[in-house]
Image (spheres, rainbow, N blue to C red):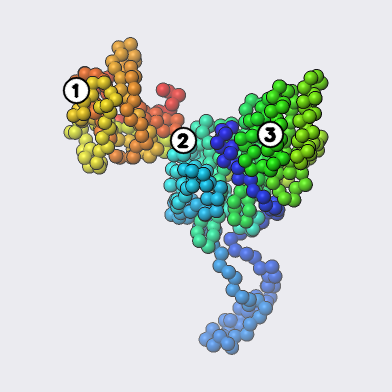
Amino acid sequence: MNRKNVVRVLGIMMTVPMLAGCGKIQTKPVSENPVEETETEEVVEVTEGTENLPSENIETTEATGAPEDELPDTEADFKAFLEGSAKATTAESLKRDYEIANEQDTYGGLSYGEYTLEELRRAVAKNQATEAAVKYTMLDCNHDGIDELFVRFEALNSSFLSWTGVIRDTEDGLQICSSYEDGYRSYAALYKSGYHTYGGSYSAGAHGEGIYGYREDCSEYCLFTVDSVFATYGADVAYSQVEDQDEAYKLYMTYFSMLEEASGFEMRIYTSKDPDNENPLCISVENYDEGALKEKEEAFLEEVKKNGCRIIESSEMDELSDTSMYCTEEAEWTLLDSGEELVDFTLTVYSNENADDYKALGDAVIIDGSDEVPGWTADQLSNMRFTVDKPGVYVTLQYGSYDEDSASNFALDGSVFTEECEPGKVYQFKAFEGETFPYFRLYANKADRYAEWFALPDMKDGETTFTVRSKNIDEY
């Protein structure tokens, strides 16, 4: 599991009471004392017979009460967001966790602001460097009787992270309240109970899992985590836990260095910030050393106990870390967009100004590598231009020399430009005259797709415009 990702997710642990119960999905409250059917009919009769009378002459019954407070039409608001006609704004409460330099305005890789669904996907895709399918589900995660919208951008490339965001409907509009990321060496599962798990591998000898719930404002909190480590990998747990743990746990990490040689010493570490939990930090140990290291192991446990940790049996750890009451039936996701069409793209190269009306596409971006590429001079501006047709495409301009032994006749010497290119915008670069050197290759990539164009070999064919469609990276 990526260290940065672990800190991001597990660093959200806060001291709060555990929420309980699971509310029924609804958009408006139901009266606790519904009127019987016969009473309702009486009211209708009186009303129909006095349509033209002053209001003070109309008799009231117990069925007439104070008007209910208007709540947001959650179902309609979520539908508008999923259809792209409404926006969601990042919640102000998220800023409290990100006060370090250069991260004041971001949460989970997402800049603070207002987003449509597609804008949100583009922002997440840019941060994760991969395209994603869009899935969604609605469930009551904070147990107030009203559903929240969970939007999941599931990476098309399993080597990248997927992003799941929680959106609630408020009087001030839709709010993105929290998010979590999983993938590569980590995993997450969302349950209809309103809780989710997050876990994964820290290294070859350490892994862990946490149970997370949601407060009233749909911000995330951690109920508890359980880490399983061998002694030689114990230090790897520090980066994911020590920042938000109490002094006892910090001291535990300090003394862990005593056991660096104890490769068979296996531990499970339970941590909780629930104020009602009598055992915020517990350790169960298996595979005690029977030789010279046993004294070190016992000394370590004594130091940990002095600082508030409780040593328990493996069976008690099993009971303490039982997740069955939280991990009920998994939530059912609805696929909104597979994302596959967004991954496909084309790269079009115009080799002279008459090949296409490139001027109509906007002002060109001039790529000047004359200080880096041998053989270039500042006044060599070529008529080579290119455009891409989809957002999120990264293009690299590489220069090289002729290689008759290469299938593309191209030997890579270096690169002068790498940028995420704006769809339809013209990029113009210095090139060559005839078959002089150097010459160029354009390499474009987006998620698991790539496209490339070789200047010299292609120009030898006498063509003036090339449109290259992307293909799978495994064909590269």
Disc 2 versus disc 3: distance between alpha carbons? 36 Å
User: What kind of element bears circle 1?
Assistant: loop
Q: Nearer the viewer, mark 1 or mark 3?
A: 3
Q: Please rate how many residues cluster around mark 1, counting C-alpha atoms within 10 Å: few if below 14, some from 14 to 19, many from 20.
A: few
At horizontal 33% and vertical 30% (from top left) the residue drawn is: 417
Q: Position of residue 177 (x, y in %)?
A: 55, 51
Amino acid residing under circle 1: Glu
Amino acid residing under circle 3: Met
Tell which of 345 and 36 is nearer to you.
345
User: What kind of element bears circle 2?
Assistant: loop
| Camera sees residue 296 | yes
Q: Position of residue 475 (x, y in %)?
A: 42, 23
At horizontal 49% and vertical 40% (from top left) the residue drawn is: 133
Q: Nearer the viewer, mark 1 or mark 2?
A: 1
Q: Which residue is mark 3?
A: 253
Disc 1 versus disc 2: distance between alpha carbons? 37 Å
Q: Quadrant of residue 435?
A: top left
Tell which of 190 and 284 is nearer to you.
284
Residue 433, which numbered label? 1
438 relative to 91, above or below: above
Residue 130, which numbered label? 2
User: What kind of element bears circle 3?
Assistant: helix
182 relative to 149, above or below: above
Q: Position of residue 158 (x, y in %)?
A: 53, 32
Q: Please rate how many residues cluster around mark 3, counting C-alpha atoms within 10 Å: few if below 14, some from 14 to 19, many from 20.
A: some
At horizontal 23% and vertical 38% (from top left) the residue drawn is: 358
Earlier in the chain: of badge 1 and badge 2, it is 2
Q: Quadrant of residue 56?
A: bottom right
Indicate the quadrant containing the C terminus: top left, top right, bottom left or bottom right.
top left
| Camera sees residue 328 | no
Earlier in the chain: of badge 2 and badge 3, it is 2
